[in-house]
Image (cartoon, grey):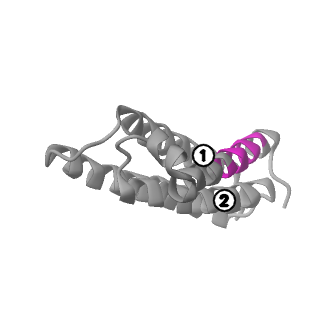
Amino acid sequence: MNSPRHLRILAVVAVVFGLLTIFSGGRALFGGTQAQAAVGNAVGFVLWFNFLAGFVYVLGGAGLWQGKHWAVSTAGLLALATALVAAAFSFHVMGGGAYEMRTVAALALRFGFWIAVFIVARRALKPMH
């Protein structure tokens, strides 16, 4: 099944977002001391989640491009998983843990993006009866 044009645009954005996430997360996790110092007070579990989720972003984007119905579930699960990580992150912050303000913005952006993708994909790929 071919996907509508707006879904293909979201698919490209998802893949690019995923590749950038993998690259930046990989640098932060596996880069040298200079790369790791640049992330400041990054929260480890958030950093690992984002890095690993980047691979799922690419997979989800490929599914959207192909108009696969499972891409709707993938987008929904990414939104849910991001919300759960954000909740755990908020407990970390409330407990006095060190963090970067950009982490708050990044989690909000990721959650908002995947909720939007879920809604658009659900409408575009609803099963025909």
Quarter containing the N terminus = bottom right
Q: Which residue is mark 1?
A: 117
User: Measuring 60% from the left and 46% from the top, which residue is drawn there?
Assistant: 117
Residue type at tag 1: Val
Q: Say which residue label 2 marks.
A: 60
Q: How many marks?
A: 2
x, y percent for residue 43: 35, 51
The quadrant of the rendering that contains the C terminus is bottom right
Q: Nearer the viewer, residue 121 or 47?
A: 47
Q: Secondary structure at mark 2?
A: helix
Q: Residue furthest right?
A: 2
Q: Residue at x 63, y 62 (%)?
A: 55
Instruction: Read off the magenta span.
Output: 9-19
Q: Residue at the spot x=68%, y=64% of the render?
A: 69
Picture quadrant where residue 84 is located: bottom left
Tell me, yes or no, whether the two marked residues, 2 and 1, touch with CB atoms within 8 Å: yes
> For this view, does 103 lie left or right of residue 95?
right
Identify which amino acid the numbered label 2 is placed on: Gly
Q: Extreme left residue here?
A: 95
